Image: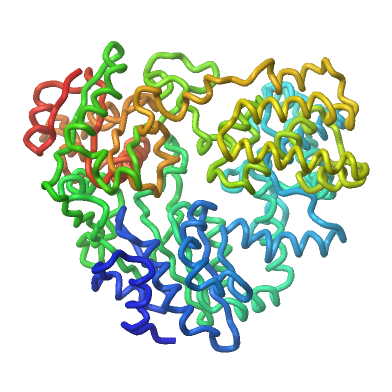
Amino acid sequence: MIITDVDIEKAEQVLLSDGIHFDSERRLFIKDLESCDLLAVPGSGKTTALQAKLICMARHLPLEENKGILVLSHTNNAVNEVKKKLRTECYSLLDAPHFIGTVQDFVDKFLAIPYYEQCFNQKVHVIDGMAYEQEVERYLNASFYRLTKGTKYLRYKKFEFASIRVHHNNGGALEFSKGLDEKLSFKPVKKWIDEGTEQRMHDGIKADLFNMKKAILRKGILHYDDCYFLADTYIHKYPFVVQALRKRFKYIFIDETQDLKKYQLDLIDYIFDCNECCIQRVGDKNQTIFNRPDRIVPEQWIVRKMECLQNSLRLTDSIARVVNPFAVDKAVDDTGKPRFTVVGKRQLEHGDIPPYLILFDEYTKDELLPTFNDLIERYHLRTARESNKYGFHVVGWNLKRNAGEVKDKLRLEDIFPNCEKSSDKGLSSYTTLSKFLVFGCRELCMHECKSVIQKTMVCVLRNLDILDCEGRFYSKTSLEKQMGLLGEEVFNEYRLLLYRASVLMFQQKYSECYTLVADYLTGSFSQIFKISNNNKILTDFCEKEFDTELLNTDAPTSFPDIKIESVHSTKGQTHCATMYVETSFKDYESSHLFKQKKKATKNASATFYPNPLFQEEAQYKQVTCLAVMRMMYVGFSRPTHLLCFAAVKDNWDNDRIRKMRNLGWKIIAL
């Protein structure tokens, strides 16, 4: 296959505005059909370039031997972004032999589920983290008297049994781990050591863990991580599966590669890294913000045959100069010269807007939003085309404090109360019907509204430990099946409730939707599943009335078009204006960067490391500082027009403020 300029012109007509064309940097990538890794700066249009490549390739379908194209990403949002234009322009890519989905979707569909069904001769019941954790708790309670002393002791110590995974070691033997990437270890117990029973206790714990995993697996209840164990077992036990996948997929494209874990990348490489296939991995290693910020994590993505997109179509030159020093990975070439540089190409009609440093403290934090709004007004951003498309956002690293954490430093919730966002929590975290309805939908479409209503019912049944006829927790599918078995009248009432509640939820009439669903749960639903009217779990879930305060959590009523959310939830987004508010992870972002010093030597006294805030080439080695740089890199690189950095006043002396002013920052001290 050869992608031509004519193909690219067709893609431009579909993806770009009139008169806009792909530059030479992007054309080279679009035409390249050899294995490579593309490192792309924020706002470089890498997803658009990937869409263009797919549109061009669709013009040459079918491929030789009717092979397919595989497109993978980390999240459903990223997958939907790729699919957006393909649905109308090249819908053939959405059907077999092609596949577009998350890595989890691919692993489930092609590896884990087929292997499970082959081994257990039954269907997988559910793949879900919440269902798995509840089943672990249920198993441990039911098996308590059969557990060994060591396991009972761990239960007393609140050991996280639900985090245990199983995998094969290099020798092929089964091993346990905590999660998929952390070695399992037990804290020494002095009594066991003194008695000489430590090894026996550990062996008993591992035997209990193995029995637990086996029992839950047989029920068809899988954690997402379990699918990788099943997939790995499948491809090593039956090598022909790898050959079959290589014959089906010729081209493999991975978007947002930096968000994938090493075990995911290793699995894809094991299957497709061969002469028969072309693998192209796209992303920005500097936007890896989902690793633990207090732990050194080995490099996940080792780049091979590097290509770069350095021109940011989102950022102005003034914002790009702020962002570039925060790039931890400069992707140096063989000569040591950096190949990854953020270059801002956006031209504003009235010239670049300078970045703003807004200094605040405990007493002036309430002035942050009005100040940000004043800047939006000053530069007439609400009349800008990008304002309707991208909006205005306040972002921060640390959204909420953990339970029991001392309120010594500010989090986002301390500055902006009730800043809870649906993107920050899974549905399993919502403890009330009101929260399910308000925060449940990410995309607010009818299908998703219906799904959320069903999940409220599933959640109630799971919390009440009510099982289906096969002794499993209910899923959406098994609940619908059960309703159908109860007769036409019951089933029609259930379907009508779903329809009416979904419409109200879609229309954002949350209070009316709440009343409808709550009446059903405490009425017909409770009668069907024999739930007492005064059952505390159900009454706590439904509450006495709809929590109207939740409607004020997306934005303050004074500034309804300003959204407040975590940096993690805005990753991949574009904003018209962004205010990054520093919050505390052990300390504030600027505090972490300011306090790092080089050690004193015989010939030199201690000096501060170069600081990216002052557009200096940072040399930090401390893991938390590197995490701070990545977080600020992501947060600072969102806006097209205005960037504000709100920092705690105590960290900024006159010399630091002077440096920022000399670099073009405007200073506002509240």
Question: In the figure, is residue 140 to the left or right of 376?
Answer: right
Q: Position of residue 64 (x, y in %)?
A: 55, 88
Q: Quadrant of the C terminus?
A: top left
Frontmost residue, 382 versus 248: 382
Q: Quadrant of residue 158?
A: top right
Task: Judge whether 353 appears above or below 175 on screen.
Answer: above
Q: Quadrant of the N terminus?
A: bottom left
Task: Judge whether 264 appears above or below 441 on screen.
Answer: below
Q: Position of residue 228 (x, y in %)?
A: 65, 56
Coloration mode:
rainbow
> Which residue is at the far top?
363
Q: Quadrant of residue 500?
A: top right
Question: In the figure, is residue 581 to the left or right of 172?
Answer: left
The structure residue drawn at horizontal position 32% and vertical position 26%, both measured from the top left corner, is 588
The structure residue drawn at horizontal position 68% and vertical position 18%, both measured from the top left corner, is 543
Q: Quadrant of residue 94?
A: bottom right
The structure residue drawn at horizontal position 34% and vertical position 44%, both measured from the top left corner, is 388
Figure label count: 0
Frontmost residue, 504 versus 377: 504
Residue 150 in view, yes or no: no
Question: In the figure, is residue 87 to the left or right of 358?
Answer: right
Frontmost residue, 357 versus 583: 357
Frontmost residue, 339 versus 621: 339
The structure residue drawn at horizontal position 15% and vertical position 46%, both measured from the top left corner, is 318
